[in-house]
Image (spheres, rainbow, N blue to C red):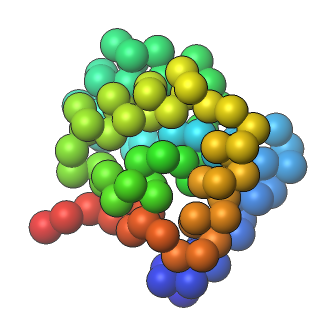
Amino acid sequence: MRRTKLDELPQLWNVLKGEMSLVGPRPCLFNQTDLINERAVRGVFDSRPGITGLAQVSNIDMSTPELLAETDAKMLASLRVADYFNYIIQTVSGKGAGDRIRS
């Protein structure tokens, strides 16, 4: 189910409710304090969380919080409509590893 991204379907409900966007920084967990701090410094929390984004299609995961927050901020600062749809297409076509954690 994870490989086919079907586990993301419930998040579409959050998109429809306006709590999330299709494209944006992936939500982090309450215990990911390094990532929370890095995102706070960069203003990433000023936008809605998303199902996919630049970090996901670039294989940047939660194990590198500084790089992830930096990539999220870069995406938000330069996001255009074409980029928005490009990230969706890349995600649907299987590019990127999502938000897996390297061991």
Q: Is residue 89 above or below residue 47?
A: below
Residue at 59% from the left image edge and 40% from the top image edge: 24
**Closest to the observer: 9 or 67?**
67
Q: Residue furthest right?
A: 16
Q: Can residue 19 be seen in this view?
A: no
Residue 34, position in %: x, y?
23, 31
Q: Which residue lies furthest to the left in this view?
A: 103
Image side of residue 85 versus residue 70, left or right: right
Residue 52, position in %: x, y?
57, 53
Q: In this view, does 2 lie above or below 79?
A: below
Residue 68, position in %: x, y?
32, 39
Residue at 46% from the left image edge and 15% from the top image edge: 43
Residue at 30% from the left image edge and 24% from the top image edge: 38
Image side of residue 24 versus residue 17, left or right: left
Quarter of the C terminus within the rendering: bottom left
Q: In this view, does 52 lie above or below 66?
A: below
Q: Is residue 28 visible?
A: yes
**Closest to the observer: 83 or 43?**
83
Image side of residue 96 versus residue 33, left or right: right
Q: Is residue 3 above or below residue 79?
A: below
Residue 77, position in %: x, y?
54, 21
**Closest to the observer: 31 or 79?**
79
Quarter of the N terminus within the rendering: bottom right
Q: Which residue lies furthest to the front in this view?
A: 82
